[in-house]
Image (cartoon, rainbow, N blue to C red):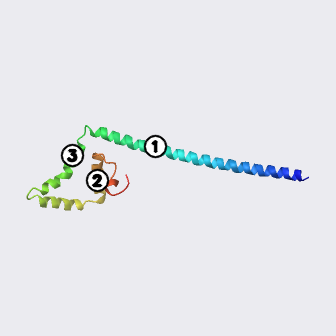
Amino acid sequence: MIAQLIAPLTQLAGSWLDAKTTKQAAEAKLKLTEAEAKAKILLSEKTSVADWERIMAEGTQSSIKDEVVTFAVLIPVILCFIPGMEDTVKNGFDRLSELPEWYTWLVFTVCTAAVGIRGGKQFFGGKR
């Protein structure tokens, strides 16, 4: 009689343990799949960045954009050492400060893109 009562209870306990084990295995597999997907995304991102840098480096070999941008940036510095041009430089910067903020960012973006800088975060203390 006791054996007849114990047999269904052991079957019930066994199926409960099987269900719990199956659930834990499924959760572990899901976590593994998520980790693999994240690793693929990170690898793809790193590869894309490396490809972009290689393409930009190849493109600048036959380009003079960075020299033009450098020269344009240094013109005010050079003019400051020419007697009589100091006021012209100061007036120019006064006029530049009156430009709309969106235009200032546009100029910044164009200049950084021309010399192959991916972003300005490294200049402002952010992570690359």
10 Å crowding of disc 2: few (<14), some (14-19), many (20+): some
* Number of numbered tags placed on the structure image: 3
Camera-side residue of 46 and 2: 2
Q: Report the residue marked by disc 1.
A: 43
Query: Can you name the residue that lies furthest to the left here?
Result: 83
As shown in the figure, which amino acid type bears the numbered disc 2? Phe
Look at the numbered disc 3 and give the secondary structure of its residue.
helix
Which mark is first along the chain, 2 or 3? 3
Q: Report the residue marked by disc 2.
A: 108
Camera-side residue of 67 and 90: 67
Query: In this image, 29 relative to 2: left or right?
Result: left
Label 1 close to label 2 by CB (< 8 Å): no
Residue at 88% in and 51% down: 3
Label 3 close to label 1 by CB (< 8 Å): no
Q: Report the residue marked by disc 3.
A: 68
10 Å crowding of disc 1: few (<14), some (14-19), many (20+): few
Q: CA distance from mark 3 to mark 1?
A: 35 Å
Residue at 89% in and 53% down: 2
Q: CA distance from mark 3 to mark 2?
A: 14 Å
Which mark is first along the chain, 1 or 3? 1
As shown in the figure, which amino acid type bears the numbered disc 1? Leu
Which mark is first along the chain, 2 or 1? 1
